[in-house]
Amino acid sequence: MAAPQKPPYDRCVFVNCPFDAAYKPLFDAILFAIHDCGFVARTALEVTGSAETRLSKIARIIQESRWSLHDISRVEVTPSNPLPRFNMPFECGLALGLQRFGKPEDRKRDFLVLAAKPYQDRRTLSDLAGQDAAYHQNKPGNAIDVIRKFLAPKSPSAVRGGTAIKARYRKFQAELPKLLAGLEISRKEILTLDYVPELLRVMIEWQRRMNASRRRGWAWPGRRPRI
């Protein structure tokens, strides 16, 4: 059996975010937005049971992705989380280090820092002062808007607006139980972190079918429509 084809470097987006149930609604919206903009989401959850260490896997995926998203909204200490979570800032540092000290082509990489509230990034990672962050207020719709704003200028083809992406995501969510019926996977299961690869496959297939049934007749001048 042939090995799976590696997605194009210029289309890969590494997603560095909290992996927990509370963040999952945001995570799902981010994954949907990335693919609806014509890119490919890459996460540490995409491969399990391999001989790679977690750090090696993360470093490899960062290297294979020209773009990356880093949500540091869970760094702050709370009563329920008395110790800060350093994974997200650490992985952000890996991406920034590759951009600054890697090969000449690595200078063309770009990343977006996400946070829940304004100035949260400056309080927790003051070294990023001057790096514009985006704030989602823990709302999936806001996350879709900031992802679209970050990725649209990087796409070689037209990207639909944030309002349209959010409407498509709501439609996908409404149709998800029907999509899962033939897979013998429950909605409760597929919305857990263990089923992220399966959820992504369902998302991508749904988006492909929607695009095929609604081919757009207009595109940016000189650009091929994304279908």
Image (tube, grey):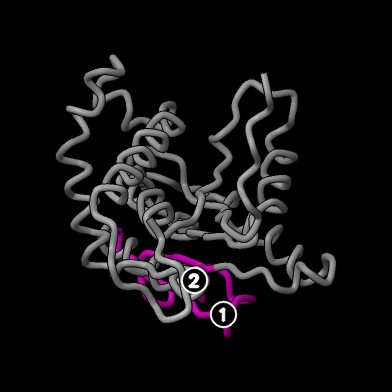
Amino acid type, callout 2: Asp
Q: Residue 121's mark?
A: 2
Quarter in which the N terminus is drawn? top right
Picture quadrant where residue 178 is located: top left
- The part of the image, by quadrant, that contains residue 48 is top right
Work out whether 21 lies above or below 169. Answer: above
Magenta highlight on residue 90:
no
x, y percentage for residue 25?
30, 46
Q: Are marks 2 and 1 in contact (CB under 8 Å)?
A: yes
Q: Residue at x 24, y 26 (%)?
A: 187
Q: Residues within 10 Å of mark 1 (few under 14, many from 20)?
A: few
Kindly report which numbered mark, 2 or 1, lies closer to the viewer in this rendering.
Answer: 1
Label disc, if present, on residue 131 of the rendered structure:
1
Q: x%, y% of residue 213? A: 24, 48
Q: Is residue 108 left or right of residue 46?
A: right
Q: Which element carries disc 2, helix, strand or loop?
A: helix
